[in-house]
Image (cartoon, coloured by chain):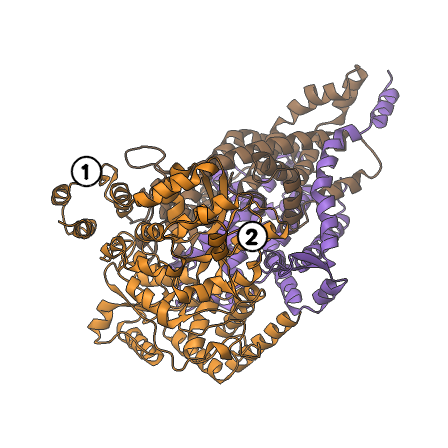
Chain colours: A brown, B purple, C orange
Amino acid sequence: MHQSRFTRTLRTIAGWLVVGAFFFPIYFWTSVAFRDAKEIFNWPPIIFDFHPTVRNFEQVFGISLGFSFGNQEAVTPGGGNFYMGPRLWDSIVVASLSTVLAIVVATLASYALSRMNFRGRHEFVNWVLSTRMMPPVAVAIPMFFIFKQFSLLDTYLGVILIHGLMNLPLAVLLLKSFFDDIPAEIDESALLDGASRWTIFRRIVLPMAKGGIAATAVLCFIFSWTEFLFVLTLTQTGLKTVPVVSSTFVTSIGTAWGNMAALGAAAIVPAFITILLVQRHLVRGLTMGSLKQ
Amino acid sequence: MSVAQVKRIAISDSPWPWLAPLIALLIVFTIYPLIYNVWLSFHEFVPRKRTLAFVGFDNWVQLWNDTRFWGALGVTFLYFVIALTVELVLGMAVALLLDAELPGFGALRAILSMTLVIPPAIAGMMFLLMQDPQFGVLSYFLNQLGILDKSTPILATSSLALIGVLLAEIWQWTPFMVLIFMAGLRSLPTEPYEAAMIDGASSFQMFRRLTLPMMSKVIAVAILLRGIDLFRVFDYVFVMTSGGPGTSTYTLSLYAWQQTFSFLKWGYGATLSLTSLVIIMVLANLFIRVAKVRW
Amino acid sequence: MKEKDRKFYLANITDRFVRGQMDRRSFLGAAGKLGLGATALGMGMGSRPFVMNKALAQEQMQPSAEVISWLKEVGKPFAGTTLKLATESTPPSNAINSQLKKYFEEATGIKVEIEVLPLEQVLQKLTLDVASSLGTYDLYYIDQSWAASFSQDVFDPREQIEAKPDLAMPNYNIDDFMPALVDGISKYEDRWVGVPYDIPIFIMIYRKDIYEKLGLKAPTTFEELYTNSATISKEMGPNMFGYAGQMKSGHYALECEWTSMLWGHGGSIFNADKQFSGNDEQGLAALDYYTKLKAIMPPGVDQWTWDGQGQAIAQGVAASMLSWGEFFPYFDDPTQTKVSGLCEAVIPPQPISLRMPDQCGYGEIPGVGHQGGSSLAVSKYSKAPDAAWIFMQWATCADTQALITTLGGGTGPTRTSVYDDPRVKANARVGAGTTRHLPVVRETIDKYMGSEPDLPEWAQISSDTIPVALGKYFAGSGGSAKETMDGIAQQVGEILKG
């Protein structure tokens, strides 16, 4: 569409302002990670003019100024042990593998839901969607007993399973609409040539829906990355993800705001890198997929 | 093979092998917890004896007479309606704004999605700090702009607390809407717009008569996905206000959480969760029907 | 120089160095004379107090040889066992987890895994564990308010000592635990539900410099606390306030502070008939006082738990608080606060009158020094109860407690002897992790401690019913003080009935 230079300039400025407003809390939180407590609590609050310190990061990731890793005995006044390095790794493992699980199961199912007409399909999709409606509190306790039964408590496998499961409805819904947008005629002509469903799925449909799958994967990754209650209930000391350990900073002698911010800020990075890596696919994928009628 | 034969094969193809893994996993995840919760809602945990005692319909009767529950339901609806409306409108506006190739807009779209990767509990803590009446940067801005008196703590004033919590909610989830709407916008065909331009339609007219109708399914999916989560969201309230002051931000999911986790009333917690599940299901099905969504 | 003096001197110069009163070179010189090299002081890693603590830890703060040799001997058969403990994030647990457990693990070959969580999540984990008799945790961290609920699920330590003489630690001396704490925290009916493990307790903390400037004396009564605070708010306002509270609606913190005021006015939560009695004459007087005091607190106290309250003192917004003594060592940390060395601790204000425990219900013990202690106990469902018992003795013995108190930053010990330990006393100087408030803590425990009632429904009453109603009242939407208290009485009645 044609726009005057003036409108374009105005729009550019507006865009920057709006995103700036959304970005401000992230900036502020990240800056808190680089402060000592006495620069966090002030009136008027300090926004830019603070004395940066990396102490919070040293405590959380066990990296001292001399870049010697694994200095996890470092103790804050009050005796806190805030060494969280390995927990970031736990988060990455859980989020990536549970995403893979959800995507594999959901692509298979969505393909069938998109291409095969069967009675009750509409109701079936509704049912899949409804599995997301159960409050997590109500799922966590029965899951605890199942997990105990199958020795899945406190294991990577267990958490990966539950996060994968949790993301299935979202993944199925999104992937189905992406597949819907790939013309069914392609499948039919391939069937005419004698190709099997599986071949069509693998060789034709999957590559075409690559972008949509990437987009769905990002959302699955994010939901696993930020999930709290299942990890809390189903783990003990073996592994923990970032949202759960961040509550460790709320101690009986107050909240370690700087350390919490340090973990929070650091935890943005891996997830954000994932987004960036798939961003090109994201736009293209969603464009193709489009969810439209 | 003729086309008719192909169609027949395609129709006679069984979807079940494809769906089997999904169904198997979902049964574990949903059917068992559902049965368990229904069973649990007729029982109550007795802390002294460590057992679940059968209590019949007590929990359900209690629910009906529980003013706390009805209050929480009201707050949840209010939260749900305001958050969904604002996120939809704001999300659409921002998506329309950013849907252009202007300097740096690619980066802006990526930056916007950063809010999504922050765990909601941490986002709640962020906004708690920013809204602190003595130290908070947001309180300071509002104070300087003359909008808010320094002696008015946002999160401890009955009339403002919900707004304070919604700020975090809307900040975090509007970008989710933007992401989905942007995808929808980019897939719209250009021909109708060109025709409309020739007819001299204004941008608002084009938005109303072309964009909105063509985006209806995208909007429906966005409403469903976010709406379901909104009804269950509790992190912000839990972290920022504990449902207060009094019960002015006390939501249904916070109630279910507290009953289950803090007071060990597993039976009543299950009853609350089931109620919440039923309400979401009814709402969602109603919506699917009214919006004429066919999967 | 004697060992004790040497430690004291070191603590002193370390402090001056940290506070910038001494340059690095003369500090190192002075330390060198004590026989400590730069590496021992961790100078290669910066000049922060916690590194100091670590260096000190390596140099001197090690478990006594006696304890280690006992561990080596008694732990031998259990090498390879793994123990699990879920605990709140408190100074003792953190100190053990981060610094001390390695000594235990090295000596015994027993591995210890500690899961650190916010308090209510600990409750949830324990409940799931006992509800299914799973034995996933070998040791339980039991908050004083849960003693009733878990009394049947853990071993009584006195029985353990008798039943397993070969595993008993020499000089463990179970009578060393302060009797008030045993009664208030660990004892339920006749059983010991573990031993007292940590003891956060309300003491009076105030800004000495401000009090002196205005010619005020440390408050000894509630009336003085109010008049002093009002004077400060008036004279030094609007950015300085006399008192900061912890008044977040719906949060346990609000209940804690209210209870302290209630007890201080001669009231109690339950009367002898086990009825809620916050709505009697004394109860209403307490709430009136609390309301009056709130008026001179910073706007926003109703958004704070003890965290915001502590920050208000630490960052120089308020001049006093009646709150957890565990905060005190933090206030002295010059890197984190603006008030290092300016705060002073005294015993809580004297009550106007005090109700006797036999006039209260459910084991409630009125006293202005509200305590929030907890016990450590071995689970009956543990698959390695003997190894767990060894760990528990080690974690709560006098030597370990002295180390926790010194390294863990001035937390209150639960044993009488530890208050007199030279290592603990040497740390009584201004600086992060100070122990200079501990004499006050000790006196408060001995004479002025208040304990909440003990009943399974207490979790709900204390963290929901009471603070929600009070929150409503302070937000101005809960009616009068009388209506609020009557409302609580009615709700508590319903909870106890159902």
Q: Can residue C118 be seen at all in this image of the molecule?
A: no
- Residue at numbered disc 2: C126
Percent of width and height locating residue A215: 59, 33
Q: Quadrant of residue A193?
A: top right
Q: Can residue A116 be seen at all in this image of the molecule?
A: yes
Give me the C-alpha separation between circle 2 and circle 1.
45 Å
Chain identifier of the residue bearing label 1 in the image: C
Q: Residue furthest bottom?
A: C281
Q: Is residue A118 above or below residue C482?
A: above
> As drawn, is A130 to the left or to the right of B82?
right
Three-letter code, disc 2: Leu
Query: In the structure shown, which secondary structural element does the residue marked by tag 2 occupy?
Result: helix
Query: Which numbered dot is residue A221?
Result: none
Task: Give the camera-side residue of B180 and C42.
Answer: C42
Q: Is residue C277 above or below residue C175?
A: below
Quadrant where the N terminus of chain B is found in the figure: top right
- Residue at numbered disc 1: C38
> As drawn, is A40 to the left or to the right of C428?
right
Q: In this figure, what is the number of numbered marks? A: 2
Percent of width and height locating residue C294: 40, 74
Q: Residues within 10 Å of mark 1 (few under 14, many from 20)?
A: some
Percent of width and height locating residue B117: 51, 42
Chain identifier of the residue bearing label 2 in the image: C
Three-letter code, disc 1: Ala
